[in-house]
Each structure stands twice: as structure tokens, then as C-alpha cells.
Image (cartoon, rainbow, N blue to C red):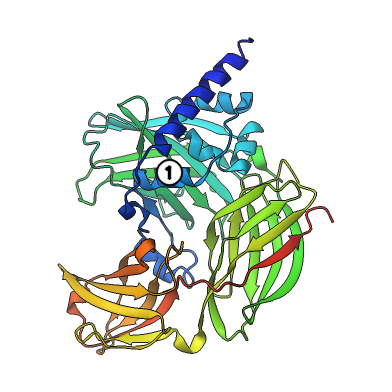
Amino acid sequence: MSDEIKPIEDLEQRLHRRKLEYDALSIPEAATQQAVQAGIRKATRQRKSRLRWMMSSVSAAAIILIFTGCIRVSPAFASFVEQLPGMDSIVSLIRQDKGLMMAIDQSLLQKVGITDEHNGTSVTIEGVITDESRMVIFYTMKGIQNPKNLMYDIKLLDKDGKDLPVGFSYSYPNPTSDEDIYENMINVSFTESLPPQELTVVFKEGKEADANEWRITFPVDHSLTQGMKRVIPVNETLVVDGQQINVNQATLYPTRLVLDMTYDPKNTKKIFGIGDLQLVDEQGRVWTTKEASLPEDGMSAFFESMYFSIPKKLTLHASGIRAVDKDKLHIQIDPTSGKIEGGPQNLKFLKKEIKGKDMILHFNITDSENANSGLSFTNIKDNKGKAFEIKGVSWYPSDAEASITIENGATAQGALDMELFSYPVLSQSPFTVDIPVNP
């Protein structure tokens, strides 16, 4: 056995043990709740606003459980793990992104290794991989004083100290085999801007003004993926559940494929999303999507990249659309009497709850059991015309129930007028579209 192969097999054994640990986890139902930051309610109108989804470490484990597959590790990927010591416990999560794995195999990882330390706790940006569309930042934390409280707020700043105009998501730090080291990654999406030449990542502990804060500034090397972009025209129009959808083009980057679609403005329904999107190649391999950008007139779906493994044939599959008649988008709720006017027939108001200064509204949506998208609203006003913002959204798939937290909603007077921003009910109208990757 060669010296090169043995470290790879050792890594495979560690990954296999980690997979067995996750397989044995009992994931509580609460871990499937979606925690949506306040910015999401305006995402379609303020595309430059930062959209941050945060999940507990258990939720991250739940994501890992979604995917299965044989564990094989290339020498390049083994080298990647060696470069980022202590990060093997999230390798299983990284490995489920075939495009990211292939990009790493192509030596597109930029090693950073810069640390900031305060009061015995340090944060290290270990490495980054980026192209014109996406950036993944790998980090570790050491010496966490209170492992039970891993609530860290993360900011991304440009060279002038201003918030980077991007969307990004992250999970709370996960423990590693070393009890003193935690780690995870930050997933950044560039929709209207290019990656910065210099980036500062800020970690803040809790919400207190005097909370500990860690700042790491590092240059971003764009040369590794410069010019790596391929535009694939599609230009297909289809009708789904009576609504017209235009599949315009796919743009292929090393870290992901972006599929752009627009909706006909003459549609009678507002489309909130498309269900179970996936790309399937001629070998039956599935290239999944986990994210989407939702502008007002369509969507951009982000898939695993096949940049370094172009298939002979690629087909888009979907199970249907989430849509509501445009004349049922506005609803009025009297939180006190429970009366609801407008909206879809299967939307039921259950109760209100006052928690401090906030108001929590509870709903039931029939025919939405186990939906992977929840309920949300925008343009919320009381009968005095006072505007309110959504502070948080929770979705309980198995019960088909949702709760909406309205910031400072305890002061709202009379009935609330609001507009649907997201709706989980999926029409069963599957469709397929061929993507001409080899015209």
C-alpha cells in the first residue's frame, strides 16, 4: 500500500464513522423549523439586502441525513482536508455538493489561515473558494467559553467597512473530534456584484453592545477561476398549471450552475417557487438545488456545478409550482376576533400570542404537510396605517402549521392588512425541460 493511498483510506474511515454517527441521530421536529431573518420579507423588492438563513448544528446534521452515497476521497480532496486541520467533521456535508468537490479537486481552494483572538477564544478563516457567482468560506473557532451558547452573528464587509451587497447563509459552529475546536462554512451568493478584492468577516457573540467580536481581513484571489464561466441558452417556454414560465438560460460556474427563469406578467397566479427542482444527466446522476433567488418576475435556481464534468444530456425536472391567484394575495386579519378575509381557502388563522413587544400569529395551511417551504408576509399595516416588519418565521411541516412573529406587533391596532410573500402549497403539475449543454 502506497503512502499516498493510506492517508486517503484513513480519511474514508473517519468519514464513514461520522456518517454512522449522523445516521444514529434522532432529529427533533423543532430542528426542521426555518428561522428566517427579517430581511427576507423584502428580498424580492430589495435584492441588494442581505438574506441570512441560520440553522442550528442539529439542523445541519439533518441536512447531512438527506444525502447518502459511497465515500470515496480523491488525493486532491485529502490534501484539502490536510490544509484545513480539524475540519474533517463537515467533510460529509461538503461532499454532497459534487460541483464544489470537483472544484476543490481542481486545486481552486485558496488557503487563508488568518486568526483573530480575544479573551482566549480565536476564530480562523482557514480557506476560501470563489468564482463570479459564489464564495464558500471555511472557518474554525477554538477555545469557545460556553459551548452551549453558539449564537454568533456574522457580517461580511468590503474594504471600506461597508456591508457587502450579497446574500449569504451560515450554520452555527459544529463540534469536531477535538473538543476545543468548532467549525463550519459561510456560503455567499453574488447576484448583483462581483467578489471583492478584499473581505472582512466579522463574528459577534450574542446581541449585547459589549459582546466579544472577532474580525478577519484577507485578500481574495480571483485568478484561480478567472474566465471560468459558460452561458448556455435555453429559451424554452412552458405552461404549468395554466401559468407560463420562460426558461431563459443556464450559466455554468466552477462552484454552481445558475438557471434563470421568468414568469409571464399576464399569468393569473403569483408564482412563489417551483417544487423539487433537480437536473438529471444521461447517467441518471442528480444535480440538486438547495437555494434560489426570487426576484419579482421569476427565479434563479442554484444547482451543483458540472463545470468539470459536462454531461452529454441534461434535463430539468420539477414536481409543480407554488402559486396563489393574484386576487387572493392580500388578506386582512383581526387578531382579536380571529376573523380573516381574503387569501387562499386553505389558509386558516389559529390564534395570536403576545410575547413582550412582539405579536406572534399562528396559522394552519391544509394540503401542505411536509412542504419544504413555509408561509410569510410582506407590507404589513394595522388599521391606522402603521407599518410593521416580520421578525421571524417558523414552519412546522408535519403539522402544516406556521407562526409569524411581527416586530413590535403588540402595539398594532385593529385588523392587520398584509400581502402573501411565500406560500407552501404545491400544485401537482410535474414538468421537464431539456438543457442543451452540448449544442
Q: Position of residue 393 (x, y in %)?
A: 34, 65
Q: Position of residue 256 (x, y in %)?
A: 62, 49
- Looking at the image, is 24 positioned above or below residue 389? above
Which quadrant holds residue 424? Answer: bottom left
The residue where tag 1 is placed is 200
Q: Position of residue 366 (x, y in %)?
A: 40, 75
Quadrant (top left/top right/bottom left/bottom right) for the C terminus: bottom right
Secondary element at image label 1? strand
Query: On the rendered structure, is 62 left or right of 363?
Result: right
* Residue sitting nearer the eye, 141 or 161: 141
Q: Position of residue 287 (x, y in %)?
A: 63, 50
Q: Residue furthest left?
A: 356
- Looking at the image, is 95 positioned above or below residue 285? above
* Residue sitting nearer the eye, 212 or 189: 189
Tell me the residue at 73%/74% (across/down): 237
Query: On the rendered structure, is 94 left or right of 30?
Result: right
For badge 1, the amino acid type reads Thr
Structural crowding at the residue carrying mark 1, measured as other residues with C-alpha within 10 Å and reported as few (<14), some (14–19) or many (≥20) = many
Tell me the residue at 33%/54% (across/down): 29
Quadrant (top left/top right/bottom left/bottom right) for the N terminus: top right
